[in-house]
Image (cartoon, rainbow, N blue to C red):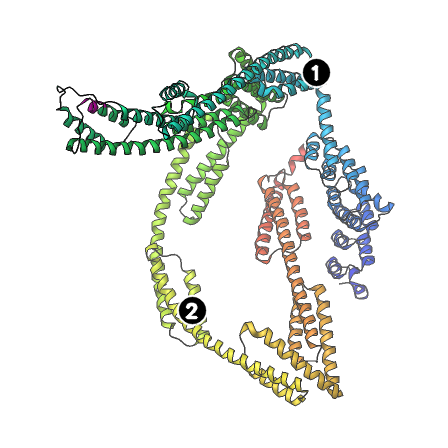
């Protein structure tokens, strides 16, 4: 140490280390000293330390331009830009001098920082956009700036197509997005010189013609007449060119078809009107017949009845099921009425009576079987044969049996027919609903969806109708009419498929102009898959589409030839990587020193790596898979043996846990609550430290240990529950003291000595339940302070004492509030805790005490909240520093991968630079500090060790350069 150093400031000491210590001690307010050091100190590391704490922009800029040391200049340049950014972020009205700084940071990441800042002045952002040339920075401003003019100015300077597309999608300003989209569109149009627009126009014209053909082919032209008119209006606006004649011809044909359909519609409406008139006539006739039957006038009006029956029978098909049922009932009643009037004709005696028992047996068998649609016919056949036999009268047993069986069958048939009618009506409603759904289908839907829906409706129809198709003949005709418009679906499908293929060919046309890449190959594969999925097209155009597709496919493949070669090279690399993984597994199997669980983790990692590596050449797939499978099988066979050994370890662990159970069982009757609790917790920690036991014994041994522990802790809990009961007694005692004080206050009585006596009782009363602490304390403090305040008015000495306490408490509140500004310090946290203790010892100060306590508590809460926040920030900073130091570790280790005689010199210089950077990075989390430093220092030492070895070998070859 120089003698002069004793008379100089520390920052002028001749020892650079002392000067560095002095700089560390200097505060931010010593800028003049830091400036002098940064400009004049002879040691570069000292100047760097001063520059890091210097905030004078002009000086930092001068040092960054003139200093003799590159590291100092670089550090000064960084600090200069940081201070400029800080200044520009805080200046609401930047000066011309401030704006001049932008030239130095216009194309750096600091420009992005300024543009992202929500508080950066608009003038700064506008000027920065004006002078900036970096495309990514301009795109950031165009996307994120809240000022439309600034965002638009930035977008105008962006020239990259990809960035323009990003702006068109993501900019916050609608006008900016619109302008970017227009520029992209204008560029594309300029590139193809209108060719694409012409192709698009031709494509639109062809689509309109195809749509016209489709509409003209509809079975119900009137339903699409409005669509066709709209299509013709669109064609007129677009201009059809050479397609005009074609579309006019199709339109003329369509109009003719519409006229014919209109005439058919009028005829159908006329026929429908006639049908409805006929239905009304038949309904009236049936009602007339039912009236004649009900009035028993069938015989008197025989001719009219026959005329009605003939008319109804002739037009029966027009009517619904309900009408038909009424008509049949009326017919049967007419027949019954006429039978009554018939003269009984003597049956010839020669009729064979032996058939009656047979007919009765048949009738009985029919009655014993389930009723179906044929039962009624069978019954009528038996009845006709019976009625051919001589008439039986009176109480004849055969007649009684016959009548009973016939009545039973008639009732069953009636019930069956009624049930069948209900089913028919229910099914008819379902079928009508299907017809309505078919009618509601929109022809403009995708034809595949339409076709699928129609098939589903038909399947539902078949499930409802089953084998009884003839019953629903009329509804089937309606269904066929509703689905008739889809009979041309194949033609529509062909047309739609051609349109889909046209779209794919347009995509392929664009793809032929792109350079080969993975994305292009992926698109080609996607297009090929979609091409295969598209349905059939007309045979006339099949070859044309096939040739176009094949031509484009070959062009794209040719464009990707270079990329495919690269991809093949990549697959060769993947092959080498996977072979290396196989070798690793084989090495794992051979390694006898590695812990088996570490081996298992390594194996898991290898398998994950295997999955992440891409494809290999096809000819190597089988061989490689076989090698990987064999290596994996060998490993898992070894792993199985390791598991067997692990089972033996589990048995040993079981014996250790049995011993722990015995210790816990010996302690469970103890009444030494604290000591025993700690011992049992230690046993529990020991239990955790012991490894796993056999699964078959795990529950048993755990239950034994837990039972012993629970037994003690249950006793302990019961003991403290008794203590809780005593807390309730304490609460009652404190409530009584509060009532005593409240009575004093209400009567205006009480002395200071009485207050002190009550306070002594209060402190002696002991603890109360946790949930009552705050309420009982507030009650006590409030009334105590009121009495104390009243006594102070009469006693000046007491008043002075309370004022002193009050002043101290206000001072303590101010002190805690001051501490909150630097809440991260451990010493300040201890000081606040001491103040809290001192507050409790000071006692009460009168009526203001509760308010003061509230302020004090809020100040303390604020202090500790800020402290937690600052500790979190410090921890985050340490984490960030850890990431920086890990990056430096990786950079140092990377130097070892290519270390040789030619690179060692540059590597050693690089290590020196890395070590300087390491010193600049702050602290890291304590648990990572030593490990990270050892990793970094180890890599650096290896580089220098290699360099020293190289220097030792150099003299032997020193003569070589001389000869050269």
Element assignment for label 2: helix
Instruction: State the image quarter where residue 773 is shown.
Output: bottom right
Q: Is residue 250 above or below residue 887?
A: above
Residue 282 drawn in magenta? no
What residue range appears in magenta? Answer: 384-392
Instruction: State the image quarter where residue 633 is shown.
Output: top left
Image coordinates of residue 777 in percent, x first then y, are 61, 77
Residue 238 in view in this figure: yes
Element assignment for label 1: loop
Left or right of 665? Residue 235 is: right
Residue 385 drawn in magenta? yes
Q: Is residue 45 above or below residue 182?
A: below
Q: How would you rate the neighbour count of disc 1 (Cα within 10 Å): few for under 14, some for 14-19, many for 20 or more?
A: few
Image coordinates of residue 60 in percent, x first then y, are 80, 49
Front-lying residue, 322 or 144: 322
Image coordinates of residue 757 in percent, x first then y, are 61, 88
Left or right of 97? Residue 491 is: left
Task: Please report the residue visible at 66 percent of the width from the left and 44 percent of the height from the top.
Answer: 910
Residue 239: assigned label:
1
Q: Earlier in the sequence, mark 1 or mark 2?
A: 1
Q: Nearer the viewer, mark 1 or mark 2?
A: 1
Tag 1–tag 2 contact (CB < 8 Å): no
Disc 2: which residue: 680
Front-lying residue, 46 or 791: 791
Residue 551 in view in this figure: no
Task: Please report the residue visible at 38 percent of the width from the left and 56 percent of the height from the top.
Answer: 692
Q: How would you rate the neighbour count of disc 2 (Cα within 10 Å): few for under 14, some for 14-19, many for 20 or more?
A: many
């Amino acid at each position: 140490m120089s003698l002069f150093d004793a008379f100089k400031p520390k920052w002028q000491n001749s020892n650079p280390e002392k000067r560095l210590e002095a700089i560390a001690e200097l505060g931010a307010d010593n800028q003049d000293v830091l400036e002098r050091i940064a400009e004049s100190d002879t040691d570069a590391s000292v100047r760097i330390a001063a520059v890091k704490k210097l905030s004078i922009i002009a000086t930092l800029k001068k040092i960054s331009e003139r200093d003799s040391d590159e590291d100092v200049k670089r550090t000064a340049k960084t600090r200069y830009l940081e201070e400029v950014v800080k200044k520009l972020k805080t200046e609401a009205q930047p000066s011309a001098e401030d704006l001049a700084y932008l030239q130095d940071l216009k194309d750096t990441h600091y420009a992005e920082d300024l543009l992202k800042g929500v508080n950066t002045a608009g003038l700064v952002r506008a000027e920065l956009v004006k002078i900036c040339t970096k495309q990514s920075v301009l795109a950031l401003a165009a996307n994120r700036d809240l000022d439309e003019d600034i965002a638009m100015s930035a977008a105008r300077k962006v020239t990259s197509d990809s960035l323009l597309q990003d702006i068109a999608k993501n900019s916050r300003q609608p006008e900016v997005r619109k302008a970017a989209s227009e520029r992209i569109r204008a560029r594309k149009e300029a590139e193809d010189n209108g060719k694409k627009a012409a192709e698009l126009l031709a494509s639109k014209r062809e689509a309109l013609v195809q749509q016209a053909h489709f509409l003209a082919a509809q079975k119900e032209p009137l339903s699409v007449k409005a669509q066709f008119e709209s299509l013709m209006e669109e064609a007129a606006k677009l201009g059809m060119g050479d397609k005009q004649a074609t579309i006019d011809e199709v339109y003329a044909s369509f109009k003719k078809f519409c006229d014919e359909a209109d005439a058919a519609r009028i005829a159908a409406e006329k026929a429908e009107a006639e049908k409805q008139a006929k239905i009304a006539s038949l309904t009236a006739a049936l009602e007339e017949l039912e009236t004649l039957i009900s009035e028993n006038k069938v015989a008197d009006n025989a001719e009219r009845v026959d005329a009605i029956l003939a008319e109804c029978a002739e037009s029966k098909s027009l009517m619904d099921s309900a009408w038909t049922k009424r008509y049949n009932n009326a017919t049967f009643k007419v027949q019954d009425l006429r039978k009554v009037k018939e003269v009984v004709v003597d049956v010839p005696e020669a009729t064979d009576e032996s058939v009656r028992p047979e007919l009765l047996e048949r009738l009985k068998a029919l009655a014993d079987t389930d009723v179906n649609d044929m039962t009624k016919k069978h019954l009528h056949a038996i009845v006709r044969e019976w009625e051919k036999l001589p008439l039986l009268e009176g109480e004849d047993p055969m007649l009684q049996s016959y009548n009973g069986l016939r009545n039973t069958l008639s009732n069953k048939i009636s019930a069956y027919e009624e049930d069948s009618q209900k089913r028919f009506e229910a099914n008819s409603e379902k079928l009508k609903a299907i017809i309505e759904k078919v009618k509601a289908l929109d022809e403009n839907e995708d034809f595949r969806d339409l076709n699928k829906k129609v098939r589903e409706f038909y399947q539902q129809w078949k499930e409802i109708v089953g084998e009884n198709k003839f019953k629903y003949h009329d509804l089937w005709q309606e269904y066929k009419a509703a689905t008739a418009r889809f009979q041309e679906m194949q033609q529509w499908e062909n047309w739609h498929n051609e349109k889909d293929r046209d779209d794919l060919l347009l995509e392929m046309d664009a793809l032929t102009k792109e350079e080969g890449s993975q994305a292009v190959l992926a698109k080609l594969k996607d297009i090929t898959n979609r091409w295969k999925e598209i349905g059939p097209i007309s045979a006339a155009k099949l070859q044309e589409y096939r040739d176009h597709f094949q031509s484009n496919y070959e062009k794209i493949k040719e464009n990707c030839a270079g990329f495919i070669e690269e991809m093949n090279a990549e697959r060769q690399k993947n092959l080498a990587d996977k072979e290396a993984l196989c070798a690793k597994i084989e090495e794992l199997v051979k390694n006898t020193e590695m812990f088996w669980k570490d081996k298992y983790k390594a194996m898991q990692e290898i398998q994950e790596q295997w999955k992440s590596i891409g494809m290999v050449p096809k000819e190597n797939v089988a061989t490689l898979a076989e090698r990987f499978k064999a290596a994996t099988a060998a490993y898992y066979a070894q792993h199985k043996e390791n598991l067997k050994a692990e089972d033996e370890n589990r048995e040993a662990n079981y014996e250790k846990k049995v011993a722990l159970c015995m210790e816990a069982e010996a302690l469970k009757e103890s009444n030494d609550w604290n000591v025993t609790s700690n011992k049992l917790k230690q046993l529990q920690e020991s239990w955790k430290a012991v490894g796993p036991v056999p699964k078959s014994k795990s529950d048993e041994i755990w239950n034994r240990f837990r039972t012993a522990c629970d037994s003690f802790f249950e006793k302990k809990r019961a003991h403290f529950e008794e203590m809780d009961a005593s807390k309730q007694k304490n609460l009652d005692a404190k409530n009584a003291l509060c009532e005593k004080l409240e009575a004093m206050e209400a009567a205006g009585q009480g002395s200071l000595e009485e207050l002190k006596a009550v306070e002594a009782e209060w402190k002696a009363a002991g603890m109360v339940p946790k949930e009552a602490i705050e309420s009982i304390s507030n009650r006590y403090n409030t009334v105590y302070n009121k009495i104390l305040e009243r006594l102070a008015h009469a006693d000046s000495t007491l008043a002075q004492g309370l004022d002193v306490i009050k002043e101290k408490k206000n001072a303590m509140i101010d002190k805690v509030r001051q501490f909150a500004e630097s809440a991260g310090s451990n010493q300040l946290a201890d000081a606040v805790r001491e103040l809290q203790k001192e507050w409790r010892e000071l006692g009460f100060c009168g009526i203001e005490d509760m308010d003061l306590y509230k302020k004090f508590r809020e100040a303390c809460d604020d202090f500790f909240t800020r402290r937690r926040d600052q500790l979190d920030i410090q921890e985050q900073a340490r984490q960030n520093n850890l990431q920086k130091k890990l990056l430096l570790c990786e950079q140092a280790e990377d130097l070892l991968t290519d270390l040789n005689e030619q690179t060692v010199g540059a590597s050693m210089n690089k290590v020196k630079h890395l070590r300087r950077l390491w010193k600049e990075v702050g602290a890291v989390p304590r648990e990572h500090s030593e490990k990270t430093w050892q990793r970094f220092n180890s890599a650096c030492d290896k580089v220098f060790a290699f360099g020293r070895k190289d220097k030792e070998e150099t003299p032997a070859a020193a003569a070589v350069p001389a000869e050269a």
